[in-house]
Image (cartoon, grey):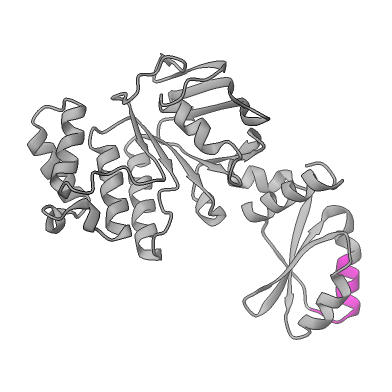
Amino acid sequence: MNPELIRVEGLGKDYGGGHGVAEVSLRLGRGEVLGFVGPNGAGKTTTLRMLAGLLRPDAGTGRVMGQDVRKIARGSDDVGYMPQKLALYSDLTVTDNLRFRADIYRLPEPGQRVAQTLAAFGLQERRKQRAGHLSGGWARRLQLAAALIHAPAIILLDEPTAGLDSESREDVWRRIQALADQGAGIIVNTHDLLEAERCSRVALFRGGRIVQQGTPAELAEAVPLRALLVPALNADGLRGAFNDEPSVLCLERHGRRLRLLVTDAGFDAICTQLARAGAAVAEDEIRLADVALFNERKAASTLPAA
């Protein structure tokens, strides 16, 4: 087990009216990437801000880098926090934004650290450009560089790839993995379930609580679901046959095939029905998107428990 950087139990924040966070318990070790996944308002950002020392918990106990979670200093040297909303000084240059952060953290030889950060994030050619004139991708890269300039042991990222093109998203994830390989502990808020599958572990949020957590493989194994791939030649007929079938949670096109997400209880019957229709069937792996869909349906109905 990696040395723990974060361990909290029963963390809560009450905003009144049933909003906020309740009974959140989690841990983060060195070299781990923990993904926070869930709909807007599920409590992900509130939890991240409490761990960053930006909000004081109303309940719960625990430690962040050995400090009481209720007493973490805002702007702790041990924590790097990147909010979803850009927090840059638009009238300052790229270099000046980084120098400002270096001065806040009282870094020795701040000029050298800024130069190293410019090089590490490929920002040298834009060092004299004002932050307000950067494209979305470059502004996001500068935001990440500013959050990491002090080499924190804990990195908290709120939707770090929001609004980025595929190449920029890949660049962010390469950096996340490289930082984890160097021993940092990282928490990433994301709506993208494919991105979340890159994480070491995932915490699924709903209604201000963590409803499941574990590795992507563990979460996939925990739900009573199977996935089937069948040729899409008779797509309309298949859709008509299974539209009202309660054991089929989802039927969608998947390349040249259709993918059916089926409950364990109805799996054999669906396979028999497909065989009678002469459809060639292959089984597919369960993904985090399937787990999230199952949890949504379970919350709204009486699906079998995971």
Quadrant of the frame with the C terminus = top right
The one of 29 and 195 positioned closer to us in this rendering: 195
Q: Where 35 falls versus 47 (above or below)? A: below
Q: Quadrant of residue 16?
A: top right
Residue 287 appears in the picture as rendered = no
Q: Position of residue 170 (x, y in %)?
A: 38, 59
Q: Residue at x 8, y 38 (%)?
A: 112
Magenta span: chief secondary structure = helix
Q: Is 138 placed left or right of 268 in the picture?
A: left
Residue 273 part of the magenta segment: yes
Most distant residue in the bottom direction: 233
Residue 58 appears in the picture as rendered = yes
Magenta residues (range) = 270-279
Q: Where 163 falls versus 13 (above or below)? A: below
Q: Is 302 placed left or right of 53 in the picture?
A: right
Q: Residue at x 64, y 42 (%)?
A: 218
Q: Position of residue 282 (x, y in %)?
A: 73, 70
